[in-house]
Image (tube, rainbow, N blue to C red):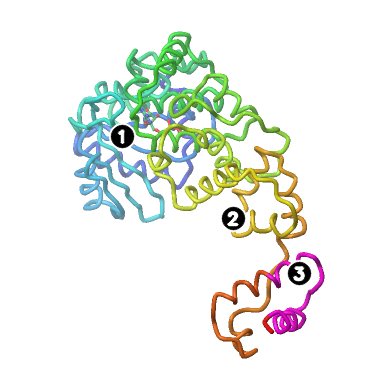
Amino acid sequence: MGILLEKKFKKFIPELYKSVIDSAVDVAQQNNIKLYLIGGAVRDLILGNPFKDIDITVEADAINFANVLKSQLNCKIISVQENLRTAKIEFGNGVQIDFASTRQEKYIASGVLPVAFNFGCELEKDVKRRDFTINTLAFLLNGVDKYKLIDYCEGFADLKSGKIKILHSKSFIDDPSRIIRALKFMVRLDFKLDSNTQKLMKDYLSEPLKKIPLERVKNELFQYFEIPKKGLYKYIIDYKVYKLFGNNPITKFEEKDLSNFKNEELQFIYFAFLVLNSEYEEERFNLTSRERKILDEIKQLLANDIQVKDDFEIYKKYNQKQELAIKIYYLITKDETVIRYSNVLSAVKVLINGDDLIKLGLKPSKDFSLIFEAVLKEKLKGKIKSKEEEINFAKKWSR
Ligand code: ATP
């Protein structure tokens, strides 16, 4: 297998990375430090998938190692993460690589992010903190066993048989976001969930913990919905993954209505469907202000279910709302007034402003907004069009 993997590795790694890895390996060798690929890169290498990027795991302190690299090679440290002892290095040819220290993790309380410790520990301890057996495979980059695959958890057999398997029975309790990761790898790699993993996932979701860190959940959901395959949302519903944060995902929408959205929009649309009725406060997902705004606006639209009577009321309902909020509201409700607004009314704009009214000799007051509203109503009826007509109308209205 060693020779085969060496060949695969040489084919897998892009030219620009080869020279950089070779020089980092030389420095590691002089200092008696072992370097490994672990996780995604090893999976992709073995499966023959294209190269995305690589992190190198250092069986030592990666920040110290980065400093040694800096002193001996043409490279600079561009960032470090002290708490996880990782360092990002940019080499002279522009290639950037993250170097991570081997480490252990301890889950002090259920649902709380783990504490990292024992940086630079033996590889075997490091792999035990990982999510699935297929992500524990390590590929040694230097020394006499260079290009050897190190497999402490039978990951190679699971990779070959296409199986997603957690390492221990408390894995989902330690980190429930692994449930979404399991589906992500299942769908992306076209693998199956191991039966015990599936049972433990079901057990967890039948009695989910209340206070889990939802930021990881959100990140994993976005990564999951990025996969260019169909049926992603259905898996989340079928496996009841929404139970991580709620009980009422939106399921009444038509898949065909989603075909024209861009990928980033789709990711957010599915996320919104899952969390709009969630029992958790939105802020726990660590949403961006735009994301929060869109969710709030959809909720306002859904709550405001009074029949609108005319174009002016339709305009008022949707004007100033984010386009994506309106689109998501439509996907959920199929409210025809959205079509009228998007196709016709949204283009209507009042062209005059306060300065124009002052030029007419009016004093700024709350009447200004009444004038603008009256102008808007006339424009929506199609009775006036140009700015000049608006000014004439305002003149008459204010007499
Ligand atoms: P890809 O980048 O192709 O999505 P990856 O396996 O590299 O896949 P990352 O999210 O970059 O995925 O994680 C890198 C490695 O870190 C994983 O292979 C896994 O070993 C470990 N890991 C990531 N997230 C978790 C987690 N929630 N619990 C345990 N280990 C994890």
User: Which residue lies at the image location 65% right of the left edge and 45% below the top edge?
Assistant: 306
Mark positioned earlier in the residue sequence (2 or 1): 1
Badge 3 is on which residue? 379
- The quadrant in which residue 369 appears is bottom right
User: Which residue lies at the image location 51% right of the left edge and 24% below the top edge?
Assistant: 183
Of 260 and 278, nearer the camera is 278
Can you say which quadrant of the picture contains the N terminus?
top left
Q: Which residues are magenta?
A: 374-397
User: Which residue lies at the image location 36% right of the left edge and 45% below the top edge?
Assistant: 97
Residue at mark 3: C-beta within 8 A of ligand 1 = no
Q: CA distance from mark 2 to mark 1?
A: 47 Å
Can you say which quadrant of the picture contains the C terminus?
bottom right
Badge 2 is on which residue? 321
User: Which residue lies at the image location 79% right of the left edge and 74% below the top edge?
Assistant: 384
SS at circle 2: loop
Badge 1 is on which residue? 57
* Mark 2 or 3: the one toward you: 3
Q: Is residue 151 magenta?
A: no
Amino acid type for the residue under numbered disc 3: Lys
Q: Is residue 384 magenta?
A: yes
Dot label at residue 175? none
Residue 172: horizontal and vertical position, in percent? 37, 20
Indicate whether 258 appears above or below 203.
below
- Magenta segment, principal secondary structure? helix
Of 308 and 19, nearer the camera is 308
